[in-house]
Image (cartoon, helix red, strand yellow):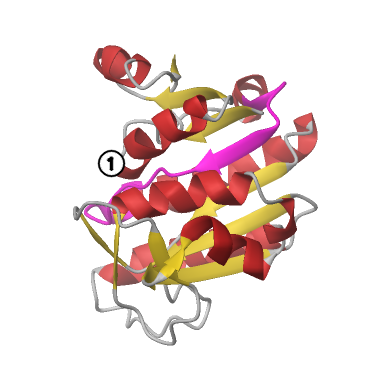
Amino acid sequence: MDIALIGGHGKIALLAEPLLTEAGHTVHAVIRDPDQTAEIEATGAKAVVADIESLDAAGWDELLRGKDAVVWSAGAGGGNPQRTWAVDHDAAIASMDAAQRVGADRYLMVSYFGASLDHGVPESEPFHVYAEAKARADAHLQDSQLAWTVLGPSGLTLEEPSGRIDLEAAESGTVSRGNVARVIAAVLETPGTAGKFLAFNDGEQEITAAVSAVS
């Protein structure tokens, strides 16, 4: 597949890119800072410099045209409410709309465990804007005609990846970023995961088997 990976210099993205390229995919990793190009290309991915906060519809179409899949792994981190909304809501939705226009039908969104329009985060909490932005973007994706999958990893760690997860967890725990990268790779190889929200922690089931079991 020819994949556009939005947020190409993120910690999860940098772990996913070599997995995807080693699997034979072409990965166009979208970054804002050209100084990150060498680090991206060391993973086997191709760096594409673009500011997703300022792209118009034509710019998004150009970015995604010819791609088979889009992986959204970008995020403003929740520190600045305006930027959080601009990236996690506005840019995310713009990418989904462009993917539909240009035929990049497979779309994988990295969200978080518990993301929902009923997230229950009070407006007084700093996390509220992020929770609202992600929930509305996820809902827009789920209402689209794309072959979407939303990933809901729990609290992210820098632990070495175990290659094993729990897709049946009722409550959020923790999951290594390396395991999230492996889930991205497995989901893209499993068309039956389209139309599903996959929330997960680190666990005991091998990732490919766990993903296949829900497809």
> Which quadrant would the N terminus be assigned to in this image?
top right
How many circles with numbers are drawn on the protein?
1
Q: Position of residue 61 (x, y in %)?
A: 68, 25
Say whether residue 160 is left or right of residue 45.
left
Which residue corresponds to the image point at 33% horizontal and 34% vertical from the top-left?
Answer: 14
Q: Is residue 166 above or below residue 58?
A: below
| 55 sits left or right of 148 in the view | left
Residue 119: give x, y in percent of width and height: 44, 80
Specify whether residue 49 is in view. Answer: no
Res. 14 visible in picture: yes
* Residue 176 location (% of width, % of height): 28, 57
Number of other residues with Cα within 10 Å of mark 1, as a class: few under 14, some 14 to 19, many 20 or more: some
Q: Is residue 43 above or below residue 132?
A: above
* Magenta-drawn stretch contains 72: yes
Residue 57: horizontal and vertical position, in percent?
A: 65, 30
Residue occupying the point 56% across, 62% down? 209
Which secondary structure, mark 1?
helix
Q: Residue drawn 31% across and 57% down?
A: 162
Which of 201/35 is in front?
Answer: 201
Note whether 29 is above or below 94 in the view shown: above
Q: Using the image, determine if residue 121 lies above or below residue 97.
A: below
Which residue is located at x 41 percent, y 46 percent?
181
Specify whether residue 116 is painted magenta: no
Position of 168 with respect to 36 (left or right) is: right
**In-front residue for pair 15/130:** 15
Q: Hey, what amino acid is under mark 1? A: Lys
Q: Which residue is mark 1?
A: 11
Query: Which image quarter: residue 124?
Result: bottom left
Q: Quadrant of the C terminus?
A: bottom right
Q: Which residues are magenta?
A: 64-83
The main secondary structure of the magenta stretch is loop
